[in-house]
Amino acid sequence: MRLSDVETPALLLDRARMRANIARMNAAVARHGVGLRPHLKTAKCAEVTRAMTEGWSGAVTVSTLREADEFFAAGYRDILYAVGIAPNKLGRAAALVASGADLTLVLDNAEAARALAAFGRERGIRFPVLIEIDSDGHRAGVRPDDAATLLAIGRELAEGATVRGVMTHGGGSYGAAGDAALAAHAELERAGAVRAAGVLRDAGLPCPIVSVGSTPTALFARDLSGVTEVRVGVYVFFDLVMAGLGVCREDDIALSVLASIIGHRADCGQLIVDAGWMAMSRDRGTASQRVDRGYGLVCDDEGRVIGDLVVASANQEHGIVARGDGGPLDVRRWPVGTLLRILPNHACATAAQHGRYRVVEGDEVVAEWQRFGGW
């Protein structure tokens, strides 16, 4: 099948770019001598996961129990569910463990630890747990220097679960830009996790795993001393937010949405395509960066960026393509039916709008890989 045979909008995956991105991350992690536990929340696809895990232990990270179910069924046993556990999910988690999964849970407070331990005592199951650390003020987690909370959580878990270690996500790096800033965030992430692990160990609590992870910090870390594994996910595709940070180039982005021009607004110098926010998502992650790419950066049907054309605005099924600087556009150069590829702001959000990848090499679709969604 050629691209001209594909009904639009469609999610495209450039296999050569994907493989190059995987090779880059594998080399970056391997040079530190630590493990790689790929995060599968973006991929949600067996074929992409096989490419991400090849040459590693097969340990994976998920962000939904649906993902845990799917990837356990696909043969992955060592699974980290990296979202704080809610009590109403413990039954489903227990079923996975009963089926043979080595499922590790995450939490960051004594209340959740108490509920988890009570469930474990009632069911005769000791879930392994990583305590989440907030290393950079980005989101959830215990501050690395909050020894009282760390130890309170550890004591609660000891009543019916097992402390397996600590984990953190250097999400603050998504607000950095440039090699030096990204390296500084990587060190903040590493140091926070290692410090928290030391608190637990000094109190006699086990902490065999020190898990860190974000694509920017993993690629720019200069030292991972004390870390045992890295969790990363968006690197497999990259996106415009990553390009805006200097983590990748625009021509490293492996994911795009194929769209057709369906009309013009000659008076406004705009093109209308059949890919609105239902195809691209509403994510506007580049709006806070130095260069705003609207709802996506526009390429020709071979994946080459066309000047500064962007999807400037979007409705549910319509995208409005215009010059990023607001200048004039000769719409006669772009007849109805012309195919365009649109690079996404946020690969996770855009992929979530689609049920399959059309895998491309050049202008040929060489495979279709199914992806799943939901919880």
Image (cartoon, rainbow, N blue to C red):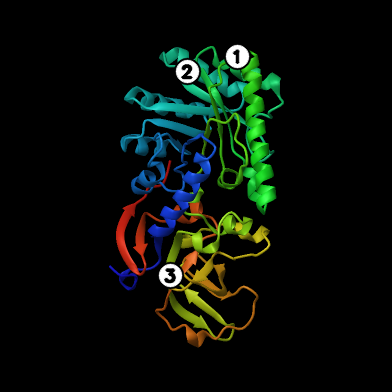
Q: Quadrant of residue 240?
A: bottom right
**Disc 3: which residue:** 259
Q: Is residue 78 above or below residue 198?
A: below
Q: CA distance from mark 1 to mark 2?
A: 15 Å
Q: CA distance from mark 3 to mark 1?
A: 55 Å
Q: Which amino acid type is shown beneath numbered disc 1?
A: Arg
- List the single residue furthest toward the left: 1
Residue 83 lies, in percent from the top left, at: 53, 35
Tell me, yes or no, if residue 359 can be seen here.
Answer: yes
Residue 132 lies, in percent from the top left, at: 59, 30
**Disc 2: which residue:** 119
Q: Identify the residue at horizontal 46%, vertical 40% (top origin).
A: 38
Q: Which amino acid type is shown beneath numbered disc 2?
A: Phe
Q: Quadrant of residue 337?
A: bottom left
Residue 75 lies, in percent from the top left, at: 32, 35
**Disc 1: which residue:** 155
The quadrant of the rendering that contains the N terminus is: bottom left
Per the image, label 1 sits on a secondary structure element best described as helix
Per the image, label 3 sits on a secondary structure element best described as strand
Q: Is residue 269 above or below residue 254?
A: below
Q: Is residue 22 above or below residue 304?
A: above
